Amino acid sequence: MRSLSRLVPLAAVLGSAGLTGCASPRPLEIGVFRPGPVCYDRSKQPQTAVVDAHLHTRPFGGTPVPFDEILSYLDRTGVRFANIYGIGQTLPADSPCTYYLDCPGTPVVSSLKNDFANAADLVAVQPQGVHITLAMTFPDLARPETILPAMELLDREYPGVFRWAGEVNLVKQALFPNGHEPVAPDAIARWAPFMQRLRERGIPIAIHSDLGNNDEPLFYLPLMERVLELYPDNDIVWMHMGLSRELTNLEAGRHLGVMRSMLDRYPRLFLDISWRVLDDNYFSVAAHQPAYVAFLNEYSERILPGTDFLASSDKDFSVYKTELEVTSRILAMLNDRSFRNIALGENYFRLLGLEYRAPEVCPAE
């Protein structure tokens, strides 16, 4: 590691470019994320994440926010790296709803259409100043025999574009009124062909798998354990640390005990801390906060940040900015090493094998 005493604070470099006296620092340029002499001064630069590893540019139904507008949100907030999801499980095209909770009883089914739409947008726009990773969101884990053929179709149409898999649903209780059911254990055993393909291509898979609910907090934990037991060599990202709106009363020590056990047993497991539900019900609760800060510092190499923003047409820049700020609150409380790993993107770069490097954090004066 480069000697921290020889690093130049990034704020000083930006100031010499005519930014001294600005009310707020200019967002980082993507070139900062290359080996070099600058460091990130947390006392002067934003404490929000520069990586959004969980961003949905397509809603469940209805019209999305235009792709170039989403890119402007990233630019204005200083997010320089984004993992773009569609929504693999969509409402019918003739549905008036944009969100599944608005339409209980309406089936939500797996589809490739959002993946094709995202790929077409990405190829057409060719983003500058922000690095986009594109995820294939279509997989129906209950029908694993359909996944490889669809992956091959995407590869034929957009070779080399998709570098991520998910967000896919192992069990998502919020979708139960729309026909979703937990994936059966015997179906998990039939994932082997597509999981092998993901390993061969170095593609992580992000899985939404609820731990349980307020009546039975760990009821669905065996499903995720089954996945990790069968596929320990795949890079797997567990969405939202297993939490959800259906599980808001789980004692922090019990939750973190499960997370520690899983991370210790499965070295290729990562945790996603996106979605403001985590902050609202756990991270910002005074009684829980110290335990979560300590946990994130302890396992900082296994954590990915994100907003879980859903780009439906009823949302705008102010909503995205708020979601980024809320989901980044706990990052400001982490030590410098953890902040670099999570907020400045080192974990994300390492997981995807990207040729970027998070800047060191400047030593405290």
Image (tube, rainbow, N blue to C red):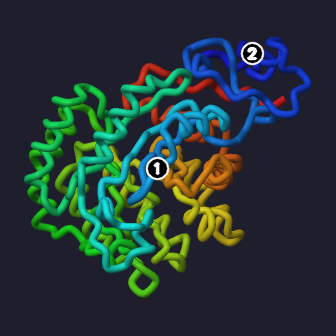
Q: Nearer the viewer, residue 147 or 126?
A: 126
> Left or right of 117: which side holds 287?
right
Q: Is residue 224 visible in this depiction of the protein?
A: no
Instruction: Nearest to the eye among marks 1 and 2: give it.
Output: 1
Quarter-of-image position of residue 251: bottom right
Q: Is residue 244 visible?
A: yes
Q: Position of residue 237 (x, y in %)?
A: 37, 49
Element at badge 1? loop
Q: Which mark is residue 274?
A: none
Answer with mark 1 or mark 2, whichever residue precedes in sequence.
Answer: 2
Which residue lies under the disc numbered 1?
64
Q: Can you say whether 137 is above or below 227 in the image?
A: above
Label 1, residues with CA under 10 Å away: few <14, some 14-19, many ≥20 = some
Measured as percent of width and height from the top left, residue 144 is found at: 12, 55
Q: Which mark is residue 8?
A: 2
Kind of residue at badge 2: Val
Residue pushed farthest right? 21
In the picture, the quarter occupied by the N terminus is: top right
What amino acid is labelled 1 in the image? Pro
Residue 139, image x and y in percent? 22, 52
Q: Residue at x 36, y 58 (%)?
A: 262
Q: Residue at x 63, y 67 (%)?
A: 280
